[in-house]
Amino acid sequence: MLSETLSKRLNAQINHECASIALYMQMSAWCAHKGYDGCAHFFRLQAHEERGHMEKLFEYMLETGGLPTFGTLAAPPLSWKNLRDLFQATLEHEQTVSREISALVETALGEKDFSTFSFLQWYVAEQHEEEHRLTTILDRIDMITTEGHGVFTIDREISRLTHAKSG
Ligand code: OFO
C-alpha cells in the first residue's frame, strides 16, 4: 500500500511523463515540418517510449492501491533555433526527469518502501541510457557541423541511430 506522499509523487510523475509525450510529439512535428524526417521519426519513437514510462507507473499505482489522476498539461514549446538547440533542449528535459526520478527514489527509501524503491530502479537505468544517448547525439552534431557537412548529414546520422535503437 502506497503512502499518501508517495502516491502523490508517483501521480505527479505520471503527469510529467504525459508532458514528455506532448513535448516529443511537438518536436517530431517541428522536425517533419522542416523536412528532417530522420529526427521526426526519432521523436515519434521517444514519445512512444514516454507512453510506456507513463503506463508502467499507471499500472504500479493501481497495483499498490493508488488512483492515477490526470491533470492539465502546459503546452510545450513550438519551435527551436536549429537541430542542435532541439537536442540540447531534449537533454535538459531528460536531466530534469532524472532529478524527478531521483527525488522519488529518495522518498521511497526515506519511507522504507522497498517495493517502490525496487520498481523505480528501472527508471534510474532508463534515465542513464537516455542521457547517454542524447550526449552521444550532441557530440555527433558537433563533430559533423565542425567539419561542415551540415544538417543533411546530421539528419541521416540520427535516422541511422534511431533504426539501430528500434531494430
Ligand atoms: Fe524520457 O523519461 Fe520518461 O521517465
Image (spheres, grey):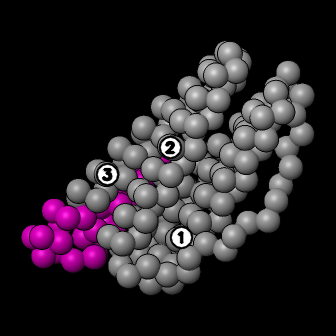
Q: Which residue is mark 1?
A: 28
| CB contact under 8 Å: marks 2 and 1 | no
The part of the image, by quadrant, that contains residue 45 is bottom right
Report the magenta residues as a range. 141-167
Residue that mark 2 sits on:
98
From the viewer's perspective, tell me whether residue 100 is left or right of residue 64: left
Residue 143 is inside the magenta segment: yes
Depth check: give the residue in front, 148 or 129.
Answer: 129
Task: Name the secondary structure under disc 3.
Answer: helix
What whole-number distance in Å separates the C-alpha atoms at marks 3 and 1?
A: 19 Å
Magenta stretch: helix, strand or loop mostly: helix
Q: Is residue 144 magenta?
A: yes
In the displayed structure, does residue 140 sit left or right of residue 50? Answer: left
Q: Which residue is mark 3?
A: 135
Q: Are marks 3 and 2 in contact (CB under 8 Å)?
A: no
Residue drawn where x is 84% and y is 33% of the image:
4
Image coordinates of residue 12 in percent, x first then y, are: 73, 48
- The mark that comes first in sequence, 2 or 1, is 1
Marks 3 & 1, CB-CB < 8 Å contact: no
Q: Disc 2 marks which amino acid?
A: Ser
Three-letter residue code for mark 3: Thr
Residue 134's mark? none
Residue 119 visible at all: no
Q: Is residue 85 above or below residue 92?
A: below
Q: Quadrant of residue 20?
A: bottom right
**Residue occupying image coordinates x 79% and y 65%:** 72
- Secondary-structure class at tag 1: helix
Residue 146 image position (x, y, % from top left): 12, 70
Which comes sooner in the sequence, label 3 or label 2?
2
Q: Residues within 10 Å of mark 2 (few under 14, many from 20)?
A: many
CB of mark 2 near ligand 1 (< 8 Å): no
Q: How many marks?
A: 3
